Amino acid sequence: EVQLVQSGGGLVQAGGSLRLSCAASGFTSDDYAIGWFRQVPGKEREFVAAISRIGGWTYYADSVKGRFTISRDNAKNTVYLQIHSLKPEDTADYYCAAGRSVQAMGGGGGIDYWGKGTLVTVSS
């Protein structure tokens, strides 16, 4: 069974840091580009960041550049999203996804698998 298992969400004060993890099972994570998306209730899911299969290319939404870092450890079949300088507007459900390419995910498409989401709440 193919799964993307997420962990690392929670309640954080503004200005704090958090690391989200996305562990792949049922497939080898380096067969896919991996991305992170987030969604606030009542709004569309938005692209946050993506990393290529081997990890040499990363792409970020403008709103998170400089604060979010995506990385992957293919030996552990895991992708991470390190978040610094959290803001209340970062509060959302965060989803990892496996897809065909960084470019496709940056455009909001090309997703083959989704994680179940993890909630990040940033208090002011």
Image (cartoon, grey):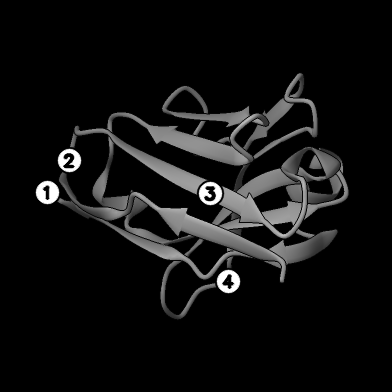
Quadrant assignment, res 55: top right
Circle nearer the viewer, 1 or 3: 3
Q: Earlier in the sequence, mark 3 or mark 2?
A: 2
Residue 44, numbered label? 4
Viewer-proximal residue among 42 and 23: 23
| x then y, percent, for residue 94 | 46, 58
Q: Tag 3: residue type?
A: Cys
Q: Nearer the viewer, residue 110 or 86?
A: 110
Asked whether, in this view, residue 56 is left or right of residue 104, the answer is left
Residue 100 vs 77, above or below: the answer is: below
Q: Where the N terminus falls, by quadrant?
A: bottom right
Residue bearing the label numbered 1? 124
The kind of secondary structure element at disc 2 is: loop
Residue 55 against residue 40 in the figure, above or below: above
User: For the residues marked 2 and 4, what is the alpha-carbon distance in whole angstroms?
Assistant: 23 Å
Mark 3 and mark 4 in contact (Cβ < 8 Å)? no
Residue 53 image point, x, y percent: 80, 34
Is label 1 in contact with label 2 (beta carbons under 8 Å)?
Answer: yes
Give how far apart the Cα atoms at labels 4 and 3 are: 21 Å
Residue, disc 3: 22
Q: Is residue 19 above or below residue 38?
A: above
- Mark 1, Cα crowd under 10 Å, few <14 / some 14-19 / many 20+, is few
Q: CA distance from mark 1 to mark 2?
A: 5 Å
Whichever of labels 1 and 2 marks the residue nearer the N terminus, that label is 2
- Upstream in the sequence, badge 2 or badge 4? 2
Q: Amino acid at mark 1?
A: Ser
Q: Which residue is mark 2?
A: 14
Of residues 64 and 35, the one nearer the viewer is 35
In this view, the mark in front (3 or 2):
3
